Amino acid sequence: MINNALVTNKFYTYSNYIVKLKKISKRINKIYVQRLDNKEIIEIPFVGHEIILYRIYTVGEVAKIVEKRPDTLRKYEKKFLIPEAKKFGGGCPGYSNWRYYTEEDVYIMVEFFNTRTPGRPVVNTKKYTIQNLSRKVQAKTRE
């Protein structure tokens, strides 16, 4: 499912910045990441990297993990059934419209899709509140 190993050319968050992992050198205890906003290369110690580097996943990567199509994720997102993706934003030229999920979001989606029964209609909990259901029942009884 989710591999916690560092992977080059993947996106991470580092000190409130979105970075792309460029090179891993265990021999000299260095990780090289590039900030997406200003293309600056930052050296990070390999030992203890899991404390400061957090993996983020693009929509396509998450779709592969949950074995669904990206447009399926967008559909469930619009219905508020899975977490909403965040955008890289205007500070990241070339990636401003890209969307990403955190590792916690990915785990929520994996659980959602694994507990879902195929063929069962999805009910949007925000639309179908108790008040709305009771109004529908009252309207049906009046007919």
Image (cartoon, rainbow, N blue to C red):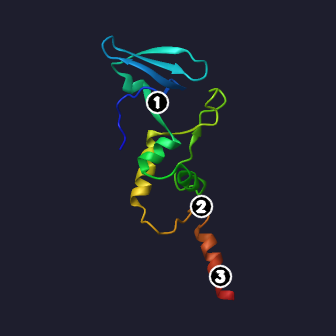
Q: Quadrant of residue 4?
A: top left
The residue carrying mark 3 is: 138
Q: Is residue 105 above or below residue 29?
A: below
Q: Identify the mark at residue 116; answer none if there is no mark.
A: none
Where residue 96 appears, x then y in whole percent?
Answer: 64, 32
- Dot 1 or dot 2: first in sequence order is 1
> Residue placed at 52% from the left, 43% from the top?
59
The residue carrying mark 2 is: 126
Quadrant that contains the C terminus: bottom right
Q: CA distance from mark 1 to mark 2?
A: 34 Å
Relative side of 97 to 23, left or right: right
Name which residue type carries label 1.
Lys
- Dot 2 or dot 3: first in sequence order is 2
Mark 3 packing: few (<14 Cα in 10 Å), some, or many (20+)?
A: few
> Mark 2 against mark 3, which lies toward the viewer?
2
- Dot 3 or dot 1: first in sequence order is 1
Foreground residue among 49 and 5: 5
**Number of labelled discs?**
3
> Residue placed at 61% from the left, 31% from the top?
95
Where residue 2 appears, x then y in whole percent?
Answer: 37, 41
Q: Is residue 109 above or below residue 23?
A: below
Visible residue check, residue 112: yes
Foreground residue among 60 and 115: 60
Q: CA distance from mark 2 to mark 3?
A: 20 Å
Name which residue type carries label 3.
Gln
Where residue 54 appears, x then y in whole percent?
Answer: 44, 30
Q: Secondary structure at mark 2?
A: loop
Name which residue type carries label 2.
Lys
> Residue placed at 59% from the left, 33% from the top?
88
Mark 2 packing: few (<14 Cα in 10 Å), some, or many (20+)?
A: few
Q: Identify the mark at residue 10; answer none if there is no mark.
A: 1
Q: Is residue 142 above or below residue 38?
A: below
